[in-house]
Amino acid sequence: MGKIILNGEIKNRSDVSVDIEDRGYQFGDGVYEVIRVYNGKLFAGEMHLNRLLDSAKLIQMKVPFTVAEMETRVKELISEDGLQDGIIYMQLTRGVSPRTHVFPSSDVEPVFVAYTKEIPYTGKMKPGAKGITTDDIRWLRCNIKSLNLLGNLLAKQAAAEAGCDEAIQHRDGLVTEGSSSNVSIVVDGTLKTHPATNLILNGITRQVMLKLCADHGIPYVEEPFTVEEMMTADEVLYTSTSVEVTPIINIDGGMIAAGETGPVTKKLQQLFSQEIERQCGSID
């Protein structure tokens, strides 16, 4: 993948560099998005791009592009790179200016960067994952998809060191979300997931999943649940752009539902796969 978008222009990656005084580099002063690509087509692209602009607005950052303009350039990048299955990573920083904690003057333009990465599609029925629980030590504006991810990284590293796939974070015993995902449980056939407050990122896959629930008669509620509830739930699953809909069958060494993927999770995996095909074509 040899191309990159820099401020609306497609360039060779080897010709692009980061300025030492870019505020994204020095302060993490920026926002980002990751969009899945199947068959060379964006999945839920407009939803992701709108969330990018929403995140920018929440940190008082102007954006010199519309959603339509960004979508056009991103599609051109996919075409030039020949990407079939993978992701588009994009980020906006507040721009390049002498280092100071105060926002720079309005004539400083944001820096927009996007690039592709190839990731093979692994099939709709994802195998069960393992998780650990950990205190949620992040800031209180998790609804902003910002570049400040140290809390997430520490949680994900703890999971990796424990031989697990994801860290399930909680505040005073109430589950918020994973280190890079949203977490849901199923009890008596009803899916339960944390409401979209400032304590979680309202994941695009989460939003698609809830719409699929509504469209296909799967009961769900958006309310917090405890670690104890999760450990005794009928099913636990996590969702994100990268893992799609994936069951969690082991948490902190304890088996969830005898280590089997439950019926609601299986149904959601099938429905999500159908939604991918509806938007992007067959993926088998």
Image (cartoon, grey):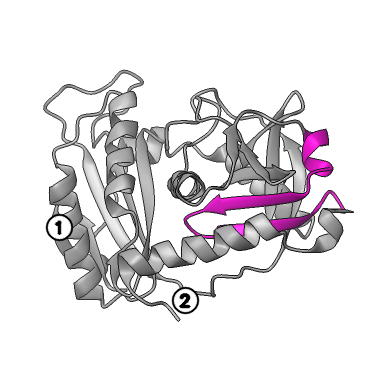
The answer to which of marks 1 and 2 sits earlier in the sequence is 1
Would you call the spot at circle 1 few (<14 residues within 10 Å), some (14-19), or many (20 or more)? few
Which residue reaches farthest top? 102
Which residue is found at the position 34% from the left and 33% from the top? 55
**Which mark, by number, is residue 243?**
none
The residue wearing badge 2 is 120
Question: Is disc 1 placed on a helix, strand or loop?
Answer: helix
The residue stretch that appears in magenta: 227-253
Amino acid type, mark 2: Pro
Which residue reaches farthest front? 217
Question: Is disc 2 placed on a helix, strand or loop?
Answer: loop
Which residue is found at the position 55% from the left and 25% from the top? 139
| Image coordinates for residue 193, horizontal then vertical, percent | 61, 37
The residue wearing badge 1 is 72
| Residue 157 in view | no
Which residue is found at the position 63% from the left and 44% from the top? 183
